[in-house]
Amino acid sequence: MAIEYDAHYFSPRDTLECGQIFRFAPFEEGYKVFSAGNACYVYTRGGTTYIKCDDNDYFYNFFDLARDYAAINEKAKSYNVPLLTRGAERGAGLRLLNQNAEEMIYSFIISQNNNIPRIKGIIERICRALGEEREFLGERYYTFPTSAALAGAGTAFYKNIGAGYRDEYLAKTSSRIAAEGIDGLFPLTTAELKKQLLTYIGIGPKVADCISLFGFARRECFPVDTWIEKLYHDDFGGTLKDRNKINAYFCGLFGKGAGYMQQYLFYAKRENL
């Protein structure tokens, strides 16, 4: 049986196309989505969004369906920031995903200084080469590889599949995670988590924020990329140049829910609202 949810607070397009996930593809009325070793088909018909999947519990959590986004949306409007209000009004169906932490570590290492089609292509080639082949709705897909599989591939593999200078980052970080695991990261405070993530080769401040927000559900994180830097200057009248200071500004302004506000702002700026 498919999961059903009010489409006003769950837009597959706005949720998937906002840069927080890379493993999805258009399919029939909506999208196929892949996370770790799981797959689903999500689409909207009328006023309802439907999720057909191989594991209801996994995707109920993945799409954060237990959370009251109406309250988050109203909180965004309460700041009386025009761009944020427009983002919340037009992007009410945007949700933050609860994704697999290891997958997010590698995905956002790949994402740096890169564009979405190329990121998706690199990840797909890695999954096809190193993941397990499975079937969903009559079509084959590949799971995201384990860290052991990633570590065993070696630097040359990543260079050959087009990872560029990130080849060494992927090889060395996967070797470390395969040896140590990441269970010790989950109990850390957010400040400790980000500090520890920065010790992995290939992870800088923005990537650490993305991993913390999208892979560890640290909703107080506020990644600063070129879009956020631009709207900071254009829409907030900001004068800071250092992205770490811009990050601190927004985290101070929005507090515990900064990650949700980041997504509304990013959506509004990208959609030219």
Image (cartoon, helix red, strand yellow):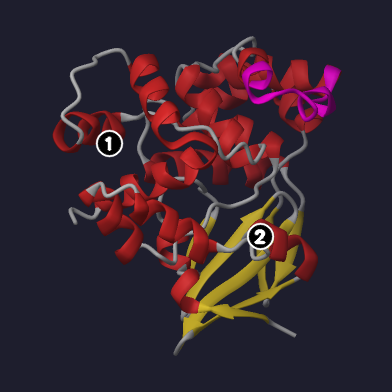
x and y, in percent, of residue 140 in the image: 67, 65
Residue 32 to residue 229: above or below: below
Q: Is residue 63 left or right of residue 130?
A: left
Q: Is residue 189 left or right of residue 238?
A: right
| Residue type, numbered disc 2 | Tyr
Q: Residue at x 40, y 65 (%)?
A: 92
Q: Residue at x 27, y 50 (%)?
A: 80
Front one among 1 and 28: 1
Q: Is residue 231 left or right of residue 213?
A: left
Identify the disc placed on residue 107: none
Q: Look at mark 1 in the image and give the residue it sits on.
A: 227
Tell me the crowding category of disc 1: few under 14, some 14 to 19, or many 20 or more residues within 10 angstroms, Cα based. Answer: few
Front one among 116 and 157: 116
Residue 187 belongs to the span the image colors magenta: yes
Secondary element at image label 1: helix
Residue 225 to residue 60: above or below: above
The answer to whether the residues at label 2 and label 1 have Cβ atoms under 8 Å apart is no
x and y, in percent, of residue 246 in the image: 33, 21
Q: Is residue 65 visible?
A: yes
Residue 141 belongs to the span the image colors magenta: no
Q: Residue at x 21, y 51 (%)?
A: 82
Tell me the crowding category of disc 2: few under 14, some 14 to 19, or many 20 or more residues within 10 angstroms, Cα based. Answer: some
Residue 205 to residue 8: above or below: above
x and y, in percent, of residue 61 in the image: 71, 59
Q: Which residues are magenta?
A: 180-193
Q: How many marks?
A: 2
Front one among 264 and 70: 70
x and y, in percent, of residue 107 in the image: 56, 35
Q: CA distance from mark 2 to mark 1?
A: 32 Å
| Residue type, numbered disc 1 | Trp
Quadrant showing the N terminus: bottom right
Q: Look at mark 2 in the image and give the residue it sits on.
A: 141
